[in-house]
Amino acid sequence: MDDLTAARVQMEMSLGFHMIFAAAGVAVPLMMLIAEWLWLRTRDPSYERLARTWGKAGAVLFAIGAVSGTALSFELGLLWPAFMAFAGPMVGLAFALEGYAFFIEAIFLGLYLHGWHRISPFAHWLCGIPVGLGGAASAILVVSANGWMQQPVGFTLVDGRPTSIDPMAALFNPAWSAMAIHATIACYAAVGFAVAGIYAWALLHDRDPDRTAYNRRGLVIAMVVGGIAALLQPLSGDLLARRAHEVQPTKLAAMEGQFATERGAPLRIGGWPDPNTRETRYAIELPQMLSLLATHDPNGEVLGLDAFPRDQWPEPRVVHPAFQFMVGAGTAMMALAVLWALLWWRGRSDGRWAQQQRLLWALVLASPLGFLALEAGWVVTEAGRQPWVIFGVMRTSEAVTPAGGVAWSLTGFTLLYLVLIVTLIWILRQLAHGNDREPVEAAEGRLVAT
Amino acid sequence: MATDLPIGLPELVAFVGLAGLATYAVLAGADFGAGVWDLLARGPRAGAQRNAIAAAIGPVWEANHVWLIFVIVLLFTAFPPAYAALSIAFFVPFHLILAGIVLRGAGFIFRAHGAEAAAVPSMWGSAFGAASAMTPFLLGCCLGAVSTGLIRVVDGRVLSDPLTPWLEPFSLACGALGLALCAYLAAVYLTLETDGELRGDFRRRALLCWLVAGAISLGVLGLAHTQAPRLWEALVMPRAAPFLLTALVLAVISGLSLLWGHFLVARVVGAGQVILLLAGWALAQWPYLIYPDLTLHNAAAPSATLWALLVTVPPGLALVLPSLWLLFSVFKGSDSVSDHRTP
């Protein structure tokens, strides 16, 4: 495996791994806060238990998120030093602001997770708020850096070197807003559906009536967060796709399997794009729909890959399936959210919706869809940006490290992350069954040898 | 001469970075040191030692860790060629450091939340401890290596052997010193967070580290003389020498305070000693980021970026420092800090 491919795979794997925990860092605090608020209001012990369990799960997920994020901050340079030498002055501000958000998140997480017995219940709940805000803020801020990579602004290229650098313009790049909204909402959808699936499974299999209320309440909170997010996503996605058409037409063309530039371009559902024959076969084509969505004119012109040199094409066989999967998963989640909401509303008084086997099974099956869609979405935007690392400015192949041995670091980190995932699943299952150890708390700030 | 350059914006930014690095060293460095003591927990109170360590670092380690992110981000924003060059020259040790950071965090959290009666948590406990030792050692090696002059950056190309600079005896000695200081700080801090015989355990460990760190320091200075001569010369000049001498004085005070049971003094002075050591090193290093080719000036990002970065610091710190104070006061507050003597 050559170094460029190894570097790309290592970066993709590190990012894909980190995304899961970053998403948890964004959304779990919100769910934790809702549960704890409901406990403070109703004194229903299920809510307290949910808040504590989600807090413990959150602790593990956040820790892995923090270290995998650190890995990325190193890997930006380790794998792509030429990119960082160029882009550092431009994207650095976004990362710096993200750093402050991390501080707030980590500090108040420490207070929240370890302060149950040390601060008043209301103060404890308040500590959860900066965790949620810090998480969301750091997600929004880091997307600014990626947005700049998609739409690089804030500098003038002179002899291949950036001059007249304007870091504020780079921070507020036009790609930022649509991407940030879509990426952040995705976190809530992913975590909401994942957690809902866990409680749906529990409702299907747990015969203990004492736990039914607990499982039900957990599911409701998860579905409220995930469902609202799932309903908002298509709106933000549409906005993002239209931006892509304006700014990165090769990406949109690859997403949609659009090889030929045409007016009244059809929307292709499914299908396999073949870059050799330059056609997308086996797709269900909805006439004029792509032009309508991309340009708001059913006869609008959509640029195809044909309009660009072959060496500037992203790989449509990666981008198109990923995009189709993401939209399909998102649509399924949306439909399920509506269905659940209807059944929940109708069965609110006695909770009979929680006995509907088919609904519960649908939730179980849909459980991974949010995270899968999140990862697929990032594949779309990153693979769709290729062959550029900075769109139109620097190719990925120009950015890779000259230090050899990337195959080794790739192997090492893949193994490391595999071990982490396996252990993590084991630990989360322990938490779910209540078999975990209580983290050691110092009593009154002092530990005495017995 | 490079040292005749005016002090300007890059120095200001570098100062902020140094402050971040020093904060990382005295906070997260102690977290690493605590992990070392976890690995080396011995005797009838081994379990209690581990519990004390877990309770001490549990609420704060993630927050302390963010200072490293702060320093890295500052480096790639303000001095991008240096970040790029270090990433190439330190491809191997940086990956090892990353593995250490990942295993340390994962090890800690997996052991804390794993089920009681399983071998898995204790395996992760060992990973936590070993990684806690490896990471500061390697960070120290890298810090030393930039002074050796073995990393050359010519025409934007990094010319350095992938293994040599950070495995030089001088670099290794810096790594060992870093590790010893982290272990020292941890043991000193833990004397304030324990009582009775447990406190005595950590006091003894701290005193041992004090001796070891002292010996290693002499080794570092001696090796600097031959392997980092420019650094050595700068260390003995009026610019940096006062910091080192004061650090030495503080080291002595810290050791004596430990001996006599004044643990709060030992903690404050111990942290002060580490800060002054780093400051002295930085002043001796100045203006070089990577001796001899990259300086603060030739590696600096344009002023617009440096200003943008500096502008974020006051509001950022205004948000972060009070929050940190809150965190530490809740978990390391006055009821857990005491000054009584050991029995």
Image (cartoon, grey):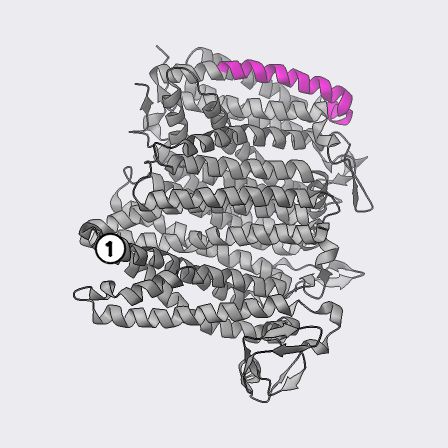
The image position of residue A269, as x and y in percent, is 53, 77
Position of the N terminus of chain B by quadrant: top right
Q: Tell me which residue sits at (50%, 48%) in the image.
A: A100
Please check the rendered image and state whether residue B227 is part of the magenta-colored stretch, yes or no: yes
Quarter where residue B131 is shown: top right
Please check the rendered image and state whether residue A222 is part of the magenta-colored stretch, yes or no: no
Residue extent of the magenta highlight: B207-234
Q: Is residue B207 among the parts visible in the rendering?
A: yes
Q: Please say if B261 is above or below A390.
A: above
Q: Which residue lies furthest to the bottom in this view?
A: A299
Q: Along the horizontal axis of the image, is A371 left or right of B295?
A: left
The image position of residue A177, as x and y in percent, is 52, 66
Q: Please say if A17 is above or below A176.
A: above
Residue behind mark 1 = A38
Q: Tell me which residue sits at (61%, 65%) in the image.
A: A318
Q: Tell me which residue sits at (56%, 88%) in the image.
A: A298
- Between B324 and A387, the one lying in front of the other is A387
Q: Along the horizontal axis of the image, is B124 left or right of A274?
A: left
- Between B66 and B161, the one lying in front of the other is B161
Q: What residue type is labelled 1?
A: Leu
Q: Main secondary structure of the magenta part?
A: helix
Q: Which chain carries label 1?
A: A
Q: Please say if A352 is above or below B193.
A: below
